[in-house]
Image (cartoon, helix red, strand yellow):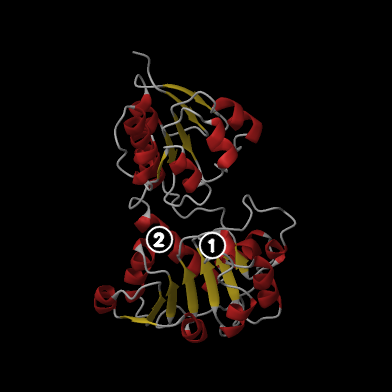
Amino acid sequence: MSKPRIYITRPLPAAAMRILEGQVEYHMWDRENEAVRRETLLREIVDVDGIICLITEKMDAEVIERAHRCRVIAQVAVGYDNIDVAAATRRGIYVTNTPGVLTETTADMGWAILMATARRVVEGDKFTRSGRWKTWELMGFTGQDVWGATLGIIGLGRIGTAIARRAKGFAMPILYHNRNRAEALEAELGARYASLDDLLRQSDFVMISVALTPDTRHFIGERELGLMKPSAILVNIARGPIVDQRALYRALVDRKIWAAGLDVFEVEPVPMDEPLLRLDNVVVPPHLGSGSIATRTKMATMAAENCLAATTGKIPPNVVNPEAKEHR
């Protein structure tokens, strides 16, 4: 019996490849620092049983139609807004993700960005390296206090909850806005539910951790930014399109808010002509939320396990559209 054939859109860690070795035949785009070209992706997926991909690949209806014998699209991420799940479901293709494993690592990164933005760490680092540090200045690079400040969390899911748990160590009053009340977590975290407008008005730091959906695209725009304190900091560790970047740029330039920390952008990689990159009061890591060695390796192994299960006739463990089985 022939082995399943899969296509991998970027090199995976050795631990993930060991899961696949000997079990499948695979082709792989082997350039770590370059996304697979669209024409290559469309050519390679025609006769495969499974695809392992990253968020950099647009797995739209065109891709899904070409992958006529595919059984699974195994995403190496928890989010899957780059995949047309409805189109995959209609073709009987499972879509899988890697939930849970990246929660704590992403929460750590959210806090790293919050702290770096509040205390102007990136600006100060550049200043030191440039040789301009000549004397200690009383008010040089002064930032915003974190201890005791109010943290507003938009989206109290796994990652939002992990962020809130860390906030307790900084004696921060916690506000949250969520699609549904989380009364059990309110008791555990001392968090208080607030309308979006009230959260924006009262918070010193606003952390975004909601999923990208049609309802959350440009969820934070000119009106919402206008409600925030002039001393407030916005941190987005979710998906770039949740924030209207043009509105954010204007709010920062006009000092309607104090600063922003963005791990994600509307277009990634960020074009070098992006106006936000010209501002000193913006911290911009390159989508590093889950970027620890252990977590990224575990994400890759989960994706490999998901892919192998589906291509050998099983229901994958982390399937987001189990109803695809009815269309097979």
Q: In the rendered image, which quarter contains the N terminus?
A: top left
Residue at position x 55%, y 35% from top? 65
Q: Position of residue 203 (x, y in %)?
A: 47, 82
Q: Is residue 323 above or below residue 187?
A: above
Q: Is residue 28 visible?
A: yes
Q: Position of residue 37 (x, y in %)?
A: 64, 34
| Residue at the far top in the pictured view | 1
Q: At numbered mark 1, what does the secondary structure look like: helix, strand or loop? A: loop
Of the numbered discs 1 and 2, the one sitting upstream in the chain is: 2
Residue 285 versus residue 273: which sits nearer the camera?
Answer: 273
| Residue at the far right in the pictured view | 273
Q: Is residue 223 above or below residue 243?
A: below
Residue 282 versus residue 234: which sits nearer the camera?
Answer: 234
The local crowd at label 1, few if under 14, some if 14 to 19, many if 20 or more residues have their Cα within 10 Å, is few
Q: Is residue 257 visible?
A: no
The amino acid sitting under disc 1 is Pro
Q: Are marks 1 and 2 in contact (CB under 8 Å)?
A: no
Locate residue 93: give its quadrant. top left
Q: Position of residue 151 (x, y in %)?
A: 43, 78
* Residue matched to label 1: 214
Q: Position of residue 219 (x, y in %)?
A: 55, 70
The amino acid sitting under disc 2 is Asp
Q: Report the Cα–Cα distance between label 1 and label 2.
A: 27 Å
Dot label at residue 108: 2
